Structure formats: C-alpha cells, structure tokens
Image (cartoon, rainbow, N blue to C red):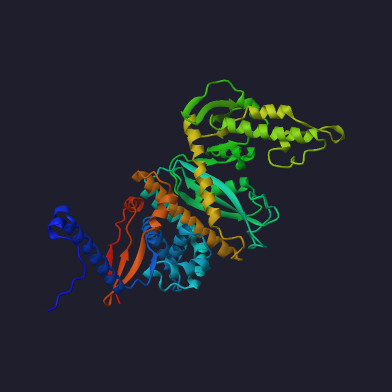
Amino acid sequence: MQQERVCSLGRVEELQKRGAIDRMIAKLSEVARQRWVRAEALKLGTPWTREYGPLLLVRRLWRDLGLEETIEQLHRRRPVELPVEEALLALVVSRIIMPRSELGSYSWLKEKVYAPEWEGLELHHLYRSLDFLAEHMDAIEEGIFGRVRDLFSLNVKLVLFDTTSTYFEGRGPEGLAEFGYSRDRRSDRMQVVIGVLMTGEGIPVAHYLFPGNTADINAFRKAVADLRRRFPLEGDVVIVADRGVVAEPLLQALEAEAQGYIVGIPLHKWKAASKVLASPGRYHKVAGNLRVKETWLDGKRYIICHNPQREPEDARRRAEIVAEMEKQLAQGGLPKIAKRKGYGRYLEIEEKGKATINWRRVEQDARCDGKYLLRTAADLSPEEIALAYKELWRVEHAFRDLKSGLEVRPVYHWTPARVRGHIGVCFLALVVESALARLLCTYGCEESLVQVIKAVQEVKAVRVELDGNIFLTRTDLLPLAQKAFAAVGLRPPPKVQPLPA
C-alpha cells in the first residue's frame, strides 16, 4: 500500500499542547453532521405548509358556545343534505383571520388551511349556509345566550345597545337598502342599519338589521321589546344606550314600564345642559380619568362625568376652530369652512349677511370640556352608572370589527336573505372573538386579541414525506399561542402524527 502526504499540520506534540487536535476533531464532526443533515433533508418531501392553529382554537370555542349542537339540531329538521355547520364554521374562521367574500373564503380554505373536515365543502355549500343562517338566526342567538350565561356564569344585569350603518354600492337588497342618516357621510348611498345587544361583560347576544332609513330611536325601541320577548332575563335589567336614542317620549315610556336605563345626553344640543352642569356639589373620583357628580332636574336623575385627561384636548380643538374662523372672517365674507363639523355652531349670521363668532356659544362649550352627561332610571350608584356607560365602548369597538368585515362595498349579495346571512356570519365571528377575549382576561393574559390571533396563526401544519411514509408535523407554539390554547382548555396537537397514504 503506497502512502501519500496530503498536507502537513505540524508536529503532534505541539498541536496537543495548544489543544488544536481537539478543536480540529470538533470542527470535522460539525462539518460531517451538517453534510448528514443535508443528505437526509433531500430525502424529505414537504408538499405544503397550511393554516392550523386558528381552526383548532375557533372550533373549540364554537363547540363550547353550543353552536355546533344548536346548528346541527336545527339542520336535522331540513330534508336536504348540506354540511351547513362546517360551512358556517369555515366562514367564521375566515372572517376572524382575514375578512373576505365567500368566494375568497372558499379559495382560502381549499388552498391554505389544513382541515380534513372541509375537504368535501363546495362553494355552493357556503352560499346556501347563508340562507340557513338567515332563516334560523333567532334560534341560534337564543342558544348562544343560554350557553354564554352558563359558560361565564353571567348575571345579566346590564345590556348594552348601539347601532351603526354601512352603505351599499348600487341599489342594495330590497327591503333593507334605504337612504338615511349615514355615519359614513355617504348620504348619496343606500344603506342598512345594524344594531347589536351585548352583556355588560362585552359578550354579544343578538343583532338586528333595519332598513337604512330607520332612526336610532326606533331601532332601540324594537330591540328592547325583542329582548324581553326572546330572552329569559331574571330580575331588573338595565339597558345602556348612546346619545342617538335619546327622545323624551321613549324615556317616559321606559319609566312607565319600570325599565331601568342609562343613556347619554348630547350636551351641545340639549337646552337644559347648562343648568345641569351648573348644579352644586363635589365630584367623586372613580378612576384616574373619571370623576362623577349626581344631580336632579325636574324629577329626573343625571350623572355628570368628567374626564380630566380629555379636558385640555377639547379646549385645544375648540381654540383651533375659533382661530381659523377669526382668520377667515378678517379676510371678509363667510368662512369657507363654516359647513365643516364643529365650525358652524360658533358662527352667527347678522343682518345683511355679516358673520361674527358667537362668543356666548364658545363660552358655553368651554364649560363642557372633558365632560359628558348621563340620564338614568337605574337603581345604581353614580359610580356604577358611569362605569356601566363606559362599557358601551365594547359595542363601539365591536362595530369597528363588524364593519371592517362586511364585504358589502361593492355588494356581493343582492337578496335580503344573503345579506342577512352574511352579516350573521360577521356576528358569529364577533361572538367567538368576544368569548376568547373573556377567557384570555380570566386566564390573566394582558396582550391584545390581535396579538393573540397573530401568535396562533404561527401554528402551521406541515405535511412531510419520508421513505414512503406520510406525517403531519406542526410548528412550535409561541408563548402567546400557548396561553391561548390553555385559556380555552385545549391541548395542542402532537408535534408529529402519521397520516394515511
């Protein structure tokens, strides 16, 4: 055997003294290991990586809220075979992860989601499930109410109500699309009015669709009547609503029926506001940004709420408006911005078209800085009333989510049933998200719901093929995703599991 010198590394004694041999062996081992990993990786096939975590989480909440059981019971009454429960679940998961049309949802669940239960779903199943939802929404909401009350041990004493509107491009569905007061400032578009009832803890229990020309007062009246008719409420229930429902005849009717209420009063439009704000008495601190004072006027009870943190912002905004109006008045003629929101109320038109600033109105508004006013017929302390009204922000936040998920611009559905079904899916997604938020709060999770959902989305399913065998692996759970699974009482799936060929 002939030997050949490849290279010279030095004398062994010297290398041993410096520890170079050990380092050389370690480096050669690392290079060998990397080459082995690359060689083995070439044997692996990974055809796809798909969404996994959100479906697991939402399905658990879906079942805990009784939606699976309720929908299946309702569907058994129909002779037509239709995977309606899985179709609605698929639409709700899609709505939570990334709002899209039914066609977009179908493409997403077929191409991006690991869900063996959805392999048989077709596009027409999704559309027909909307018709089913529109037909049975009342029964589904009543089932949600009972399960939510038991699941969270709720004592329903406060019910929050608010409305919003969203407009259509084009005519919209007959019977719903009408011209009316537009919160989107699109009075040139037909719209639909949406109302939502929530518990004081922020869990939605019912939603309503009204024609676009329905006044908030009428929507509120119908919702109150519906609440009493459909839901088994025990004891005295207080209904909390925003400024839009304030009308003396309606409030008097509620009082005559001994119905407790808390409503916001529009300070700048109510003539007696200055009298109430000028009432004597000291404010009581409820929180760092909330002080309250109780007063009575003409036998009616009012709660004055003061937010010290908001007061300088209100003053700054008004000062900017007045300064801009003075500048334009100095140039002669009517201010061009008089029609802008907040400007016209400070403008006074005198004889011969001359315009001046109404300083009396400016002074009156300065007394309202950082304040808002509540009227109530509830047997609660001023502090409880103020905090109950603050909970109304949950409904307003819910509306932001609901409207962002409504694919009605442009209109994808032209029939009332399809529009009702589509908005019903948005409502169910809102219920699931609210339940998750409640469980996360109970678990002690301080991160936002958006952060949690993003973390859960990082849980992916990966299909792996090795030596003729097929496996499903999942990516690691981020700490926040682990919290979410623990909060809903769900054990994460195995890291690796075999799949049938």
Write down the quadrant of residue 264 in the picture. top right
Q: Is residue 473 above or below residue 324?
A: below
The residue positioned 38% from the left and 70% from the top of the image is 48
The residue positioned 63% from the left and 27% from the top of the image is 367
Which residue is at the front of the view, 357 or 83?
357
Q: Is residue 178 above or below residue 396?
A: below
Q: Is residue 178 above or below residue 153?
A: below
Which residue is at the front of the view, 48 or 161?
48
Task: Find the residue positioned furthest to the right.
Answer: 352
Q: Position of residue 36 (x, y in %)?
A: 25, 69
Which residue is at the front of the view, 323 or 74?
323
The residue positioned 44% from the left and 70% from the top of the image is 111
Residue 370 showing in the rendered view: no
Residue 27 showing in the rendered view: yes
Which residue is at the front of the view, 295 or 105?
105
Q: Position of residue 225 (x, y in %)?
A: 54, 48
The residue positioned 52% from the left and 24% from the top of the image is 283
Which quadrant, please, contains the N terminus?
A: bottom left
Compared across the picture, whether 166 is left or right of 425 comes to right
Task: Find the residue positioned furthest to the bottom.
Answer: 1
Compared across the picture, whether 177 is left or right of 122 comes to right
Write down the quadrant of residue 28 in the picture. bottom left
Q: Position of residue 331 (x, y in %)?
A: 80, 35
